[in-house]
Amino acid sequence: MSILVVEDLVKHYTVRRGWFGGAAETVRAVDGVSFVIDSGECLGIVGESGSGKTTLTRAILGLERPTAGRIVFEGEDIHALSPKALRAQRARIQMVFQDPHASLNPRMSVRDIVAEPMEVHRDVLGLSGRQMTDRVAELLELVRMERGHLTRYPHEFSGGQRQRIGIARALACNPRLVVLDEPTSALDVSVQAQVLALLIGLQDQLGLTFLFISHDLAVVRYICHRAALIYRGKLVEDGPVDQIFDAPRTDYAKTLLAAMPDPDPGKSPFWGPAAQGKIQPDSEKGAP
Amino acid sequence: MSARTTAEASGTSGGEGLARAFYRFRQNPLSLVGLVLVALLLFLAIFGPLVAPYPEHLAGEVSVLDRFKPPSAAFWFGTNEVGQDILSMVVAGAQVSLLSAMGVIVIATLIGTLIGLAAGYFGTWIDEVLMRFTDLILTLPALILAMAIAAGLGPSIVNMVIALALAWWPGFARLVRGEVIGLKEEQFVVAARAQGAGAGRIIFRHILPNVTSPIIVKMSLDVGFAILAVASLGFIGIGVRPPTPEWGVMLSVSRSNLPHFWWTAIFPGMAIFVAVLAFNLFGEGLRQALDPRARR
């Protein structure tokens, strides 16, 4: 059953050129994207910087009004909702941000950060302060942190721990859909693996649906069931992860895959026989 | 700036962060001088009448025989034209000067912060209207504007404080607006919006706590200048009136005693100078301790 349907989503920005707002230029950040996410799956959205990934997520979160198209979440067009209904809706779509240093308020304790979604939706949830603290402690254990961290501040934690706090915050209101915006790209490789394993475990345990934004194909292949490639605001190819990686249909998908370093040096385009003579030696730095 | 400064600014949250900020504050001996002088001024403002050597002089119980005594062991700063001990009056003057200067800054901070928060957060036409109004006030020289308001309201200490505050808030409004515009693009603010938090919650829970450091720094720097403004208004006879002991008033009265009875002018003048300097050194020290961008 589909949980989120994105239909022909278009978001154009008008950039004013000149001093008097004369000539205007339109940036087509998202240009007619459609896809569906089924309940319980993890869909990866892959694209390079500037491809429209961020605009897409902002529209799905209701932060940005699309120029055209619809975003239907659990049967409701989110941009047709009243502001009040939209606010309530937001409890069910939560997000984990890319940079765990910037996405946690440095002046708030871990307890207050993780409890915030519950505070915001207090009218719906009706939890007392005490109950919220208990729930925060529960969530911290869920992301493998300790109850003792409740009163600490973000700067006392490592990047991986902060990202766990961000994940705990996203889970606070029992969301149906979690948008993960490059949740591991700011982390060390060893920590990345831990966080990804945690996310997969949480998805199984809580029956979550993930929309996973990334430019890292290896990560997408590891965590996602399906993937969609976007390029210049358009959806280029989508399908099951194995199909996209093993039998890409479009040229863009092939180019993107060719640029991906293979963990097996024998297969890497930088090391294998296919690369001989084509790539200069200094590009070896790009290989792991 | 965003990620890195936020991470570093986080060093000032929580108890451990305060200790670190105080450590940075102590690194500069001038900041410590400022701190000691500010503490001394606050002490005089609170206990002034108790530590003044001749408290009865403040109430007007003076001896005509003591008129225009030069500085001596009995009267360290000398006496004035009616025989009042100048040291006692300078000490008592700290109360009026500091209290009214702090009153000015507190009111100006409240007005300026609210306007800056609204303009910076909501943007668009609200920002335009509020900031054009702010610029308008800013183009008028603060002291002249305060003089006009004080003249209109009538001379009293409270009216003078209100007048100065109404001329003083634009600086705070611009400071806060600038900080808010930077902060509202921070990811933790976007995160709060994505959770469905309303404007009030975002402004007061997420943005305001992250603007407090620059506000506190500007407040402590500005108290010094407000002391100078209070003294200026007293000097030209719009603010505090004699016989209330106030440094500007004392200077004003002493004009007719110059140059022969120089001590009637030098000591109140020194008091103003030291007070302004103290708050400047203290405020600058706070800036270095709290603002990661100012650190070398």
Image (cartoon, coloured by chain):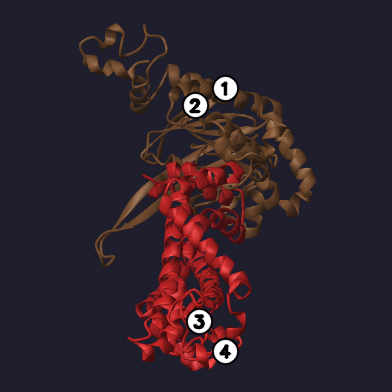
Chain colours: A brown, B red
Residue type (three-letter) at the residue carrying disc 3? Glu
Q: What residue lies at 30% left-to-right and 18% top-to-bottom?
A: A285
* Residue A45 to residue B44: above or below: above
Q: Nearer the viewer, mark 1 or mark 3?
A: 3
Query: What is the distance, in whole Å, between disc 4 and disc 3 at their CAs?
Result: 18 Å
Q: Could you tell me which secondary element the residue under label 3 belongs to?
A: loop
Q: Position of residue B152 (x, y in %)?
A: 49, 93
Between label 2 and label 1, give the one nearer the viewer: 1
Looking at the image, residue A221 lies above or below residue B141: above
Left or right: A16 in relation to A32 = left
Per the image, the residue denoted by label 3 is B246
Q: Chain of mark 2?
A: A
Q: Earlier in the sequence, mark 4 or mark 3?
A: 4
Q: CA distance from mark 4 to mark 2?
A: 98 Å
Residue B62, numbered circle: 4
Identify whether B71 is placed above or below B258: above
As helix, strand or loop, the secondary structure at mark 4 comes to loop
**Do the residues at pointers 4 and 1 share their chain?**
no
The numbered dot on residue A239 is 2
Disc 2 marks which amino acid?
Gly
**What residue is shown at x 30% (from left), y 14% (from top)?**
A270
Separation of residues labelled 2 and 3 (CA atoms): 81 Å
Quadrant where the N terminus of chain A sits is: top right
B176 with respect to B209 (left or right): left
Q: Which residue is pictured at 51% across the width and 71% down the height?
A: B105
Callout 3: 10 Å neighbours few (<14), some, many (20+)?
Answer: many
Q: Bin the neighbour count of mark 4 within 10 Å (Cα to Cα): few under 14, some 14-19, many 20 and up.
A: some
Image mark for residue A194 = 1
Q: Chain of mark 1?
A: A
Chain holding disc 3: B
Q: CA distance from mark 1 to mark 3?
A: 67 Å
User: What kind of element bears circle 1?
Assistant: helix
